[in-house]
Image (tube, rainbow, N blue to C red):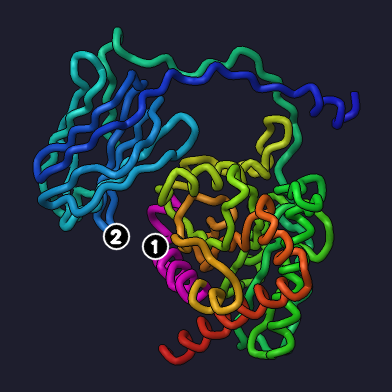
């Protein structure tokens, strides 16, 4: 049977977990209480350093918003870590660990005890907690699964041409045109523009603007209508030893009035539900008929984020602010222009990276702007100005 036929018959059918939503969080110097509106499967807690944090993963849980913090807990954040896991992160003003904890008798409250700790006690593993067996949500169950041996994605895709000055001391920027090939991305109801074509046109315009100024070198992950696995996109930037990686996108929104650009940087916890949903949708670019072509495990991603990416994430966030400032002179941004989410394409541990949503293909004005040469030139000018300002600052700091 041909491989394409096998893929067509590949199925992964699951019964979703009966998830309880986080509806209240109270945190103080000595105790954290998390309340749910329904049953969850269980929870685990662990401590992190740099900065000091306590994280709680709720299996079979849905994330809510915020929470009450006091004492050594400075702030509470939460987001959907994966479809079956809500993650809550508590920012601390000094190191602390979870010493003990338990669910309430009805399974709808998780109570954890805290105590200050030395740095050597942080990051020493997870503590797990289960509700009473009679008050425990059922985990997802696979009812039918067919696995297809597709093999790993290519580790060595051909490296693209580097444009600009023939001077390896000049900064190198890799521009990634989102989607491509069999993956069209968003499709506009206004003129049927496809995201893969819009992003490629914008990426080329940015390249041409940077080459014209001659201040930096630039490469495109793709300069044609081809498909790349997400890890291959940032992998190209890492193999080229790039100084900056920018992934260009143009999303769709449920509300046709939604318009304007947004800059996303990597975070283990999404800044809001919209960011979480967008990341989940974009990360599915690796999945064909239920088979994940990316191959990265959740544990690997978590280690990269928690242990090796702190400085890279800080540089990425600084660039995001410059991109908003420079880009807003030529195009419209959303009211909350810088957001955070766990995009796979941003997970290079040592390359500052942003995902730039240039607008919405579901909005007619955005489509007209992004689909025109004049609009693409304005976007390119804003991005190029931000890139040149970013590296000028770095040079001055040296």
Residue at mark 2:
50
Query: Which disc number belongs to residue 310?
Result: 1
In the image, 169 versus 24, the foreground residue is: 24
Is-magenta flag for residue 309? yes
Residue 232, image quadrant: bottom right
Label 1: how many Cα within 10 Å (few below 14, some 14–19, many 20+):
some
Query: Which disc number belongs to residue 172?
Result: none
Gap between marks 1 and 2 measured at Cα: 8 Å
- Residue 111: x and y, percent? 17, 29
Instruction: Work out whether 273 lies above or below 129.
Output: below
> In what element is the residue under mark 2?
loop
Q: Residue furthest top?
A: 134
State which quarter of the image contains the C terminus.
bottom left
- Residue at x-position 65% and y-position 73%: 379
Tell me if label 1 and label 2 are in contact, CB under 8 Å.
yes
Stretch in magenta: 303-323
Question: Nearer the N terminus, badge 1 or badge 2?
Answer: 2
- Residue at x-position 60% and y-position 68%: 245
Residue 376, image quadrant: bottom right
> In what element is the residue under mark 1?
helix
- Residue 185: x and y, percent? 72, 48
- Residue 206: x and y, percent? 70, 75
Instruction: Work out whether 11 lies above or below 206.
Output: above
State which quarter of the image contains the N terminus.
top right
- Residue at x-position 74% and y-position 38%: 151
- Residue 7: x and y, percent? 80, 28
Assign the magenta stretch its main secondary structure. helix
- Residue at x-position 43% and y-position 72%: 318
Instruction: Work out whether 323 lies above or below 356.
Output: below
Label 2: how many Cα within 10 Å (few below 14, some 14–19, many 20+):
few
């Amino acid at each position: 049977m041909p491989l394409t036929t096998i893929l067509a018959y590949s199925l992964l059918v699951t019964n979703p977990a009966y998830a309880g939503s986080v509806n209240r969080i109270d945190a103080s110097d000595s105790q954290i209480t998390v309340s749910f509106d329904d049953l969850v499967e269980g929870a685990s807690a662990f401590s992190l350093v740099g900065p000091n944090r306590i994280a709680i993963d709720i299996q079979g849980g849905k994330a809510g918003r915020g929470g009450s913090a006091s004492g050594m807990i400075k702030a509470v954040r939460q987001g959907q870590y994966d479809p079956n896991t809500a993650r809550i992160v508590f920012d601390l003003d000094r190191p602390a660990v979870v010493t003990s904890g338990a669910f309430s008798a009805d399974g709808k409250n998780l109570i954890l005890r805290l105590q200050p700790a030395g740095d050597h006690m942080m990051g020493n593993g997870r503590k797990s907690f289960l509700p009473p067996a009679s008050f425990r949500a059922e985990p997802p169950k696979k009812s039918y699964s067919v696995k297809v041996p597709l093999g790993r994605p290519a580790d060595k895709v051909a490296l693209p041409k580097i444009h600009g000055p023939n001077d390896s001391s000049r900064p190198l920027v890799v521009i990634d045109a989102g989607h491509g090939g069999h993956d069209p991305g968003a499709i506009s109801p206004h003129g049927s523009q496809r995201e893969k074509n819009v992003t490629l046109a914008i990426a080329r315009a940015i390249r041409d603007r940077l080459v014209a100024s001659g201040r930096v070198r630039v490469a495109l992950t793709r300069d044609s209508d081809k498909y790349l696995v997400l890890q291959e996109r940032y992998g190209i930037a890492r193999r080229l030893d790039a100084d900056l990686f920018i992934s260009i996108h143009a999303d769709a929104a449920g509300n046709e009035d939604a318009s304007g650009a947004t800059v996303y940087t990597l975070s283990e916890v999404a800044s809001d539900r919209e960011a979480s949903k967008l990341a989940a949708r974009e990360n599915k670019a690796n999945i064909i008929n239920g088979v994940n072509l990316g191959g990265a495990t959740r544990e690997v991603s978590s280690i990269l984020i928690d242990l090796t990416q702190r400085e890279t994430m800080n540089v990425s966030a600084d660039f995001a602010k410059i991109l908003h400032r420079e880009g807003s002179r030529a195009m419209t941004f959303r009211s909350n222009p810088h957001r955070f989410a766990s995009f796979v394409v941003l997970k290079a541990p040592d390359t500052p990276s942003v995902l730039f949503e240039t607008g919405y293909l579901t909005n007619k004005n955005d489509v007209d702007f992004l689909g025109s040469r004049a609009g693409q030139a304005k976007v390119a000018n804003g991005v190029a100005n931000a890139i040149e300002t970013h590296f000028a600052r770095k040079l001055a700091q040296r």
